[in-house]
Each structure stands twice: as C-alpha cells, then as structure tokens.
Image (spheres, coloured by chain):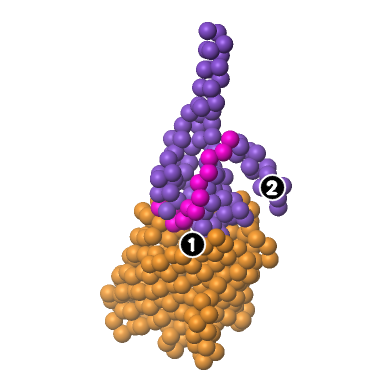
Chain colours: A orange, B purple
Amino acid sequence: MNLFRLLLTGALLVAPHCLFAKPIAYAQGTTVMAEYGAGTMNEAQVFYAPRYDWSLGGGYLELDLDRPGRQIGITYARANYLAKRWNRPKAQTNVFVWGGAGDARLAETNDHAFAWNAGAQLDHETRRIYGSLKTDLHRAADFTRRIDTLQLGIAPYEHDYDTLATWLVIQGRNYTGDRHEGVEWALLLRLFKRGAWLDAGVTAGGKLQAMAMFNF
Amino acid sequence: MKIFITVFALLLSGIAAAGTIEMKVNGLVCGFCAQGIEKTLRKKDATSDVLVSLEHSLVAIETKTGLDIGDTELKKALTDAGYDVTSIERTARPLSEIRASLKGKH
C-alpha cells in the first residue's frame, strides 16, 4: 500500500507521461468499452460525445466485495468532461473529470440502493511514452469503494495514423476496502489501430486483465 | 480573339483546379483519437480527400475542383476536434504526392 501511495505521489510530482482509455474520444463519436479486471472488477460503458470536451453515457460496474463471490453491481449514468487539454507539437496532456448516479445491487441479498460516482484522470502521451493516473469513487448506502489506477507505457516504435500502435503497459491498481491487500500489478500488451483498441495481459497473481474499446 | 479566349480559359482552369490545404497541428500523438479530425473534415462539401500524419504533425485536405475551405472554418473544425492549428498553407501539390513523399521519409 505504501509503495502504491509513493508511486502515485511521485507520479503526480513529476507530471507523469500518461494516456489511458479516454472517456471522450472525439466529437460526435460513440465509444463502447468493456473491461475484465482480473476476476475482481468488470465494467462495460457506452458514451456519446456531442463535442470533443464532454460525453454522456452509462455503464455497469461489477465489483467483488470482501470475499470472492460477494459482489455489488452498479448500473450508472455518467457525464464526462475534459477539464483541460494541453496540445504541444509532439505531446498531449489531458485532465478529465466525471460524475454520475445510478443503482447499486448487492448480489447476495438483492438489496438496491442509490449510488453515485465521481472520478478524475490525468494523462500525458507522446508517441513513445505515456502514463495515466485515474481515481474512481463509488458510493452507495454503506458501501464505499475507490479504485486508483496508474498506467505507465512505452511503445517500441512510433505508430502513425494508419499503422498499428503497440504499447507495453505496466498497470498498478489499488482498491480501498477489505477485498485486496496492496496493489494489483499487471503487465499489459496494448494494440490499437483506427477505431479499435485492445489491452490484454496478466496480473502478478496470474489472472487475466483485458479491455476492449471501439470508437465509431 | 481566339488567343485571348484560350488564355482566359487556361487561367480559369488554373483557378478552378483542385487545391491542397496543409495544416500543422499540435497534439497529434494518437491515431485512435485523431480519427475525429478525418471524420469532421470529410463531412465538408469542399473536401475530396484527407491525410493525417502523426509523424509530421500534419493534416492535409484536397479540395474539390473550384472549392475551398476558409481558414476560420478550418481552425474551428480542428479546435472543435480538440487540436490546435499552428499554420495553414495552400499548395498545388496533390495529396497523393504528399502521401508518397511522407512514406519516402519514413
């Protein structure tokens, strides 16, 4: 836990080289995303962006609670906003924020409660390096869970508009609550070309971590 | 008189010929995100073809014969797509030639 906090602090201090699956891709674009998070977190999202700096949509997040099999499912509507973007000749930096509300259901008892969500993401990218730092808070009745994700990546070559982009990504993810001790580390291979994006890899515990995203 | 008409016709054809607009753009680092630029520009009536090069921070548009897109409109399109235009230049180079030239530079 201390290592993760140190990394997060360090990453903020040195303005990390970041990019991530952005919640807004481009104006008048629809983004569909699904993530399988090592068997402990699954999420699906759909967003439409009327402009390049905001999008609206919804999703479903499924989280393991204090033990495997005890899950909460949150169905939400969410708005994403690009709070700040810095465009430079060979780099881009973004700050995104989002918030939403929905319904949380505890699978074990089928109890429902109002849920809300807020989050933020800082990312910076060039064509060779990137990093992102994301925090995502979910609250419902007596349930509170924050998921912090740090990604650092390097590209073995510089992709261009019409070529396949390949990235090697290290991901550290920390969940508040009792479900996980310490940081869940994963090594990912990221591929994207045109409107299709795929992350796949394994966690330090040998579990699958995967994410697919499409823009159209 | 015939000479005058011929010269006039030649001048007119030169004016009405398809042109190319080359723009230098800041923030072009991700092919996934830059699709918005191509989609926006292809929707314009004057657009015949679009080229995006991350390597050269370049967005180029080939316009249809006799048509053009104003600088203000171009800047707005790129800004609305989330990018910053730093320069706009009109050239006679066909987009195919620019494409070939960029490939040669790789």
Cα distance in 3D space between marks 2 and 1: 25 Å
Task: Indicate yes or no whether the magenta region holds residue A108.
Answer: no
A69 or A208: nearer the eye? A208
User: What amino acid is found at the position of numbered circle 2 in the picture?
Assistant: Lys
Q: Position of residue B71 (x, y in %)?
A: 43, 44
Image point (57%, 62%), residue name: A90
Of residues A22 and B77, the one nearer the viewer is B77
Disc 2 chain ID = B
Q: Mark 1, residues whose alpha carbon is within 10 Å: few (<14), some, or many (≥20)?
A: some
Residue B3 place in picture, x, y as percent: 57, 11
Q: Secondary structure at mark 1?
A: strand
Find out whether residue B91 is within the magenta segment: yes
The answer to which image quadrant residue A76 occupies is bottom left
Q: Which residues are magenta?
A: B80-92
Callout 1: chain? A
- Secondary element at image label 2: helix
Instruction: For the residues labelled 2 and 1, say whether their Cβ atoms are less than 8 Å apart.
Output: no
Q: Between tags 2 and 1, which lies in front? A: 1
* Image label count: 2
User: Same subunit under labels 2 and 1?
Assistant: no
Q: Nearer the viewer, residue A45 or A124?
A: A124
Task: Identify residue type, mark 1.
Answer: Asn
Q: Which numbered circle lies on residue A87? A: 1
Q: Residue furthest top?
A: B1
Q: Quadrant of residue A117?
A: bottom left
Report the front residue among A215 and A6. Answer: A6
Marker disc for residue B103: 2
